[in-house]
């Protein structure tokens, strides 16, 4: 098991609690322990907890959201491009090139074939179709067709780039979300371990942690891998 995965092996890292409440839990623990003044052995742990709290962004609630905006824009541009290809085939390519060898080239990039391609392949194959529009503009009888095709393709390309950028930002946010959550969880875990060295009674340990606001993770709460929380030792 990797060191990264091992951080999930305690309930502070896997609690079903919102990020706002998780930070409030950490701040409450820091305040309670500072006021209790239990001794020098807690100082380093309290410093680590404060550092974790300072680096914890409770507003990172959208990191688990799907990239709906980018995806919807791409789907709309893709649909528009495929519609353009289909209309061009019906209005110009088939009527004017059907009996010519060039017709077979255009058929390779028909709407149904392009629709079955993934994102990267669609962009690449569509570039080749643009070249055909340019090459046979005169035979197609519509000098403006290549420019119209480029405009439709550019919308698809721009939407694809936007979706990739949005996806990268979301991925980075997820990494940040997971990292600061684990840092705070680790600080709380180590403080709990120090408290267990001081107190034999679990109630004396747990009185420094306020779990009253724990709840099932909502759509916008941090979705971390979960394992059953261990029961307090008696």
Image (spheres, helix red, strand yellow):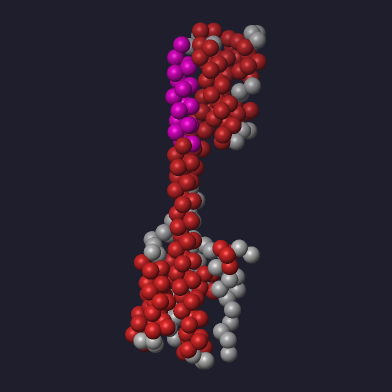
Q: Left of 78 or right of it: where is 54?
A: left
Q: Nearer the viewer, residue 68 or 52?
A: 52
78 shown above or below 45: above
Measured from the top left, where is residue 103 in percent x and y? 63, 13
Residue 24 visible (yes or no): no
Q: Can you give x and y, in whole percent of width and height, for residue 42 in the image?
A: 41, 81
Q: Is residue 195 above or below residue 171?
A: below
Q: Quadrant of residue 31?
A: bottom left
* Range drawn in magenta: 143-160
| Residue 222 in sight in this render | yes
* Foreground pick, 76 / 233: 233
Residue at 50%, 76% in the rendered image: 189
Relative to the observer, which residue lies in front, 58 or 197?
A: 197
Residue displayed at 47% across by 85% down = 195
Is residue 30 on the magenta stretch? no
Q: Quadrant of the C terminus?
A: bottom right
Residue 152: within the magenta? yes
Task: Determine whether 148 is above or below 4 in the image.
Answer: above
**Residue located at (53% from left, 63% from top):** 224
For the N terminus, give its image quadrant.
bottom right
Name the quadrant containing residue 28: bottom left
- Dominant secondary-structure state across the stretch colored magenta: helix
Looking at the image, which residue sits at the far left? 35
Q: Position of residue 29 (x, y in %)?
A: 40, 79
Number of numbered discs visible in the structure rendering: 0
């Amino acid at each position: 098991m990797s060191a990264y995965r091992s951080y999930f092996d305690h309930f502070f890292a896997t609690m079903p609690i919102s990020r706002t409440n998780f930070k409030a839990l950490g701040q409450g623990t820091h305040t309670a322990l500072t006021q209790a003044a239990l001794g020098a052995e807690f100082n380093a742990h309290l410093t680590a907890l404060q550092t974790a709290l300072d680096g914890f962004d409770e507003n990172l609630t959208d990191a688990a959201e799907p990239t709906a905006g980018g995806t919807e824009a791409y789907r709309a541009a893709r649909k528009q491009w495929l519609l353009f290809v289909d209309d061009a085939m019906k209005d110009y390519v088939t009527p004017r090139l059907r009996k010519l060898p060039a017709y077979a080239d255009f058929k390779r990039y028909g709407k149904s074939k392009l629709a079955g391609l993934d994102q990267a392949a669609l962009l690449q194959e569509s570039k080749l179709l643009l070249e055909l529009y340019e090459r046979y503009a005169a035979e197609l009888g519509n000098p403006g067709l290549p420019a119209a095709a480029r405009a439709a393709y550019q919308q698809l390309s721009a939407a694809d780039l936007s979706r990739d950028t949005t996806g990268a930002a979301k991925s980075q946010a997820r990494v940040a979300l997971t990292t600061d959550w684990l840092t705070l969880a680790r600080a709380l875990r180590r403080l709990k371990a120090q408290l267990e060295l001081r107190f034999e009674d679990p109630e004396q340990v747990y009185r420094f942690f306020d779990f009253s606001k724990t709840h099932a993770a909502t759509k916008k709460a941090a979705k971390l891998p979960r394992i059953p929380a261990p029961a307090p030792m008696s």
